[in-house]
Image (spheres, rainbow, N blue to C red):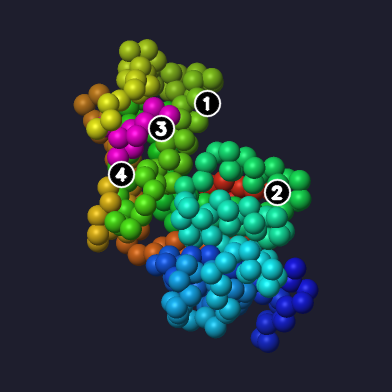
Amino acid sequence: MTESHEQHPLTGAVPIQVVVAGANGKMGQEAVRAISADRRFAIAALLVRDRSFTTAGSSAAVFDSAERLLAETTPDVWLDLTDARSVVTHVDLALEAGVRPVVGATGYQRVDLSRWQAVCERDKLGGIAAPNFAIGALLMTRFAAEAARFYPNAEIIELHHDGKKDAPSGTATRTAQAMGEARELSAVSGQAATLWPALDNPDRRQVATTELPPARGQHVQGVAIHSVRLPGLVAHQEVLFGGTGEVLTIRHDSLSRVSFMPGVLFSLAKVMELSQFVYGLEHLLW
């Protein structure tokens, strides 16, 4: 879709045309600043809920309708930073228009991911859904998955600003899923039992799979997730593993939304190289 776009006057390259959906949110505003400062990209349009809002740092056209935006512009990438009420509709529309989605919003379901993966595979189109764009958060999930092979008992505490509507967070859910996948692989191979024989005690393994009472958080693949929503927070997560006479804690803190921008920019460039839909930025980093 970029053939009609003007080349950059200094580099001669044709910039990747990006739509920012949710541009008037805090994450959206940060993304607009980061994209505008990177010569690889140009903002094709902004999608906002309230058109009276002015997004600093961009003179791109502003729309309050995804359908009209896609009818009047020719973007390469749709960056969705909206919410659970809008993201599924937006990504479906983007894919229908042949626009590659980069999904930072959460609230979609497995059935949505399966549908997006099928469309991208059919149309040889790239797509990325990233529960978290921060490299530290991705490493936290990776380390937690490794630790889960040795500790059958674990819980997650995720803390976010009071404006975050979904709970548990996409990062916490993805972490629990990664931990469950790692445990399943270890069980099949017998590796965990070989490395740490005490973990082969069926009574201890049962603790991780027993249904927990409601006050103990939402249960995801044997891991209780506790969600905290308070003003003053940005995005924080602890994964706690309990063992015999010890506790292992893996924690990540995003102190500013700037921490997500390197991952956002990486995704906007990388999605142009893909011909499939990828869930989890970690699959593109290692």
Dot 4, how many residues are within 10 Å of its Cα: few (below 14), some (14-19), or many (20+)?
some
Tag 4 near tag 3, CB within 8 Å:
no
The residue type indicated by label 2 comes to Cys
Q: Is residue 185 left or right of residue 92?
A: left
Q: Which mark is residue 227?
A: 4
Task: Report how far apart the C-alphas of labels 4 and 1 lie in the structure.
Answer: 28 Å
Mark closer to the chain start, 4 or 1: 1
The residue type indicated by label 1 comes to Leu
The residue type indicated by label 3 comes to Val
Q: Is residue 188 visible?
A: yes
The residue type indicated by label 4 comes to Ser
Residue at point 72%, 81% (across, down) = 7
Tag 1 near tag 3, CB within 8 Å:
no
Give the residue pinned by disc 1: 185
Q: Give the quadrant of the N terminus.
A: bottom right
Dot 2, how many residues are within 10 Å of its Cα: few (below 14), some (14-19), or many (20+)?
many
Residue 181 % position (x, y) = 50, 31
